[in-house]
Image (spheres, rainbow, N blue to C red):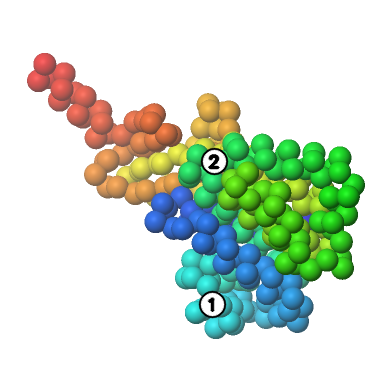
């Protein structure tokens, strides 16, 4: 993706991360619903052209999206896609690619929550090696004359009960809905997404007042340097901290708030 589409995808990724960081959201269900939207947009060329038409207002496109999807998928999926159509896209196909990426990322998030992400990443790699070394298998999976049901049955025989459910789901979607891509390219893309998800860390940041964009960028860069990984910031405002910020990464807390310092002074005086 280039230009406007790249920026739109980056914004959509941030919205998905913010949404799936909440454990109340069923990431696997969200993935299934976004995959259904992907199939709809791929099938309905005129619809995706309308939704990416730069001459149409963003709110009008979001309203149309809501009317079409509400009742068919959950509110989280509707909100995500509505936000995406408000953005500008360089090509209509880029919107479809982006929704598909969010679907796969949501599934990988589900694997991460269950502690299975490392297994999924390993299984994607091994499946790619198997397909690359078995010409007959690759031909069966990429045969345009084969039905979706036949390909699904073949994958169930290969992966069912032998791989993580997320692995089976994302590979099945890739094989049954290739959308013009090679199997190898699709598997490489899935492996990249899994690696990015594994390397991502979340920092919960609490401050007395909202941080500016510059402050968020500087904090994110500093934390990434400390931990050696991409850092996603979950921001919370709590006036009771009085000043400074508190950062929690996993079980580690970096507390630089005035309230914490006052408590420390109080403890020392009491001692």
| Image position of 219 with respect to 150: above or below | above
Residue extending furthest toward the top: 271
Q: Position of residue 103 (x, y in %)?
A: 61, 59
C-alpha span from label 2 to label 1: 29 Å
Residue 89 appears in which quarter of the rendering? bottom right
Packing grade of label 2 (10 A; few <14, some 14-19, many >=20) is some
Q: Whole-percent x and y of residue 129?
A: 80, 39
Chain-order first, disc 2 or disc 1: 1
Q: Position of residue 199 (x, y in %)?
A: 59, 36
Q: Residue at x 53, y 28 (%)?
A: 227
Q: Nearer the viewer, residue 56 or 118?
A: 118
Label of residue 116 in the image = 2
Neighbourhood count class around disc 1 (C-alpha, 10 Å): few under 14, some 14–19, many 20 upward: some
Q: Which mark is residue 127?
A: none
> How many labels sit on residues?
2
User: Front-most of 214 and 149?
Assistant: 149
Q: Is residue 132 visible?
A: yes
Residue name at image x 54 percent, y 40 percent? 116
Secondary structure of the residue carrying numbered label 1: loop
Residue 72 numbered tag = 1
- The reply to whether residue 87 is visible in this rendering is no
Residue 155 rendering spot, x and y as whole percentages: 71, 54
In this rendering, the label closer to the viewer, 2 or 1:
2
The C terminus, quarter of image: top left
Residue found at the very far front of the displayed protein: 157
Q: Determine contact: label 2, label 1, CB under 8 Å.
A: no
Side of 247 relative to 55 (left or right): left
Of residues 208 and 31, the one drawn nearer to the viewer in this rendering: 31
- Quarter of the view holding residue 163: top right
* As drawn, 10 above or below 261: below
Residue found at x 48% / y 54%: 20
Question: Residue drawn 52% across and 50% down?
Answer: 110
């Amino acid at each position: 993706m280039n230009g406007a589409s790249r920026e739109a995808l980056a914004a959509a990724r941030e919205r998905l991360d913010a949404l799936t960081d909440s454990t109340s959201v069923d990431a696997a269900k969200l993935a299934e619903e976004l995959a259904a939207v992907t199939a709809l947009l791929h099938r309905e060329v005129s619809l995706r052209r309308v939704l990416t038409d730069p001459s149409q207002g963003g709110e009008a496109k979001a309203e149309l999206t809501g009317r079409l999807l509400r009742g068919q998928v959950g509110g989280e999926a509707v909100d995500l896609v509505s936000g995406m159509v408000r953005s500008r896209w360089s090509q209509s196909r880029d919107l479809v690619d982006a929704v598909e990426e969010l679907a796969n990322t949501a599934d990988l998030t589900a694997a991460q929550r269950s502690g299975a992400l490392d297994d999924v990443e390993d299984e994607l790699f091994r499946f790619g090696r198997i397909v690359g070394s078995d010409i007959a298998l690759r031909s069966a999976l990429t045969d345009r004359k084969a039905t979706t049901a036949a390909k699904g049955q073949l994958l169930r025989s290969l992966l069912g009960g032998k791989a993580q459910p997320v692995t089976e789901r994302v590979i099945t979607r890739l094989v049954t809905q290739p959308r013009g891509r090679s199997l190898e390219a699709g598997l490489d893309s899935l492996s990249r997404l899994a690696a990015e998800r594994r390397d991502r860390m979340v920092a919960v940041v609490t401050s007395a007042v909202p941080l500016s964009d510059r402050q968020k960028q500087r904090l994110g860069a500093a934390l990434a340097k400390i931990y050696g990984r991409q850092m996603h910031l979950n921001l919370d405002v709590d006036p009771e901290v009085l000043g400074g910020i508190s950062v929690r990464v996993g079980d580690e807390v970096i507390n630089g708030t005035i309230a914490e310092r006052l408590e420390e002074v109080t403890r020392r005086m009491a001692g």
